[in-house]
Amino acid sequence: MDADTSARPKIRIRGLSVAFGTKHVLRDLDLDVGVGESVVIIGGSGVGKSVALKCILGLVQPDAGSIQIDGEEVVGLRGRALDRVNAKIGMLFQSAALFDSLQVWENVAFGLIQGEGMERESAHEKAVEKLAQVGLGADVADLWPAELSGGMRKRVGLARAIATDPEIIFFDEPTTGLDPIMGDVIDKLIVECVRGLGATALSITHDMTSARRIADRVAMLHEGKIIWTGPVATIDQSGNDYVEQFIHGKAEGPIQMQVRR
Amino acid sequence: MPILQPIGRVFLNFLAATGRLSLFTVRATSHCVRPPIYPRLVMRQMVEIGYYSLPVVGLTTIFTGMVLALQTNSSFSSVNAESATATIVVFAVTRELAPVLAGLMVAGRIGAAMAAEIGTMRVTEQIDALSTLSTNPFKYLIAPRLIAGLTMLPILVVVGDIIGVFGGYLIAVYQLDFNAANYLAQTWRYVETLGVVSGIVKAACFGFIVSLMGCYHGYHSSGGAQGVGAATTNSVVSASILILGANYLITALFFGVG
């Protein structure tokens, strides 16, 4: 997809720093995501990918830095102001995070009923429509989350993320825990949904196959900073040793894993 | 000195925990009185706390009333004061036993369930998902439980009062050969407004404590299944201790002076 990078970025992150106690997770992180662009942040486990997403969503308060969405500062927002910003955002969680106490259709329609005040009947129709969009039949609508397989849970999570037609969608490890075929299915659905909505997408993953499928641009996060960014087509010629090691999954290289012997 | 360090650390941790709980209480309470309120969720919690706790509260209070009648009769017979059995049963059940036992039983049944449910929602990112769907977790999860706990426990205690007194009546009349009409008349004579009202006030306070502890520990749980288990245990233990402490304070308030 051609991103509109000439205009103001949809998401603009500057100098984002987060520490939990003495552990510095993010250090002066800078990142722009253009309107309609799909950016994938790659990086090893525990480098702060999820924390970066949670900062944008207001779930984690950064120690320093700025996050702007459509030019509006979101760091420090609370209550209705934060809800207004979050209303622009859909999120697919790593574990799908479906509400166990609600049926599938209620999960999908949650944002419509609670956030937009839609009537339950209309919301049910819209939920079934969104489920169809992710390849699930109407019979799934009345099931409970506990009755779904891992792949189905991801699809329902995706349907919930796109139910309110958000301007921005976050994907947290969308293919983790899925078999390669289901991973491919989810990636294709993500691309279709993002393009269908004309949304801006920010994903985090360490699955390079998935990253190549869904990204317009890739950013590599290491030790709390973006150390390389570029179009997905150029990642194999990045010239960056860290990126090289990561995308080829080599134990030897500048990235040293903590392995206790 | 090395010995002072751990004491200081424990004291500081206690102060920090008290501060966190106070802020949580203020925030949670404020969401109980500010719209929007979710009537459907409040009703669901009322059914869960009120209706489904009836059997356990009923069984606890009926056996307590029965034991109380037996013990009172056995103890007071040595001073020829068996006739006080009805009075002791009605005083003890309405003032103390029904509210305290109902509070403790509900803490075990409902407080633990709340901590486990909310704790699981926390560690599976469901609470984060609520926030991203423009829904305040305090409004959606905490406030309905607090409102339901506050309103349902007094109703449970009134039912428990009746069942507990009835348990004493059963033993007094059918085992200890009290005259039924006299026993009932004496019971009725000593049902005092202050005793019943103090029991209801205690129940409301205990219901709030049980819900608050369940929600607080569940909301702050971390570390997967082990963390949820710890939250469940902590909610029951802290609610039980706070119930017993609050019971003393409310008793002192109602009956301690004059």
Image (spheres, coloured by chain):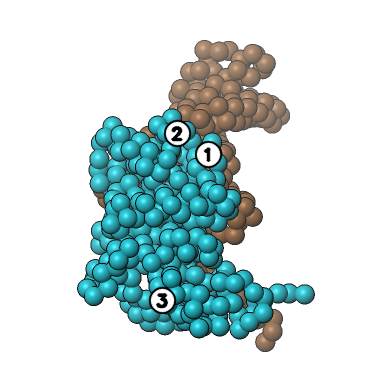
State the CA–CA distance, disc 2 to disc 3: 40 Å
Q: For chain A, what colour was chosen?
A: cyan
Residue occupying the point 35% across, 51% down: A193
- Could you tell me residue A13's position as x and y percent? 34, 75
Residue receiving disc 3? A230
Q: Which residue is mark 1?
A: A148
Q: Which chain is brown?
A: B
Spot occupied by residue B108 in the image (x, y as percentages of width and height): 58, 42
Q: Residues within 10 Å of mark 1 (few under 14, many from 20)?
A: some
Identify the mark nearer the N-term, 3 or 1. Answer: 1
Q: Are marks 3 and 1 in contact (CB under 8 Å)?
A: no
User: Whole-percent x and y of residue A197?
Assistant: 29, 53
Mark 2 lies on residue: A140
Asked whether the residues under the numbered discs 2 and 1 touch, taking CB atoms below 8 Å apart as contact, a structural biologist would say: yes
Up-down relation of residue A15 to residue B175 (above or below): below
Look at 50% across and 42% down and name the residue there: A152
Drawn side of residue A3 relative to residue A259, left or right: left
Task: Evaluate whether residue B203 shows in this view.
Answer: no
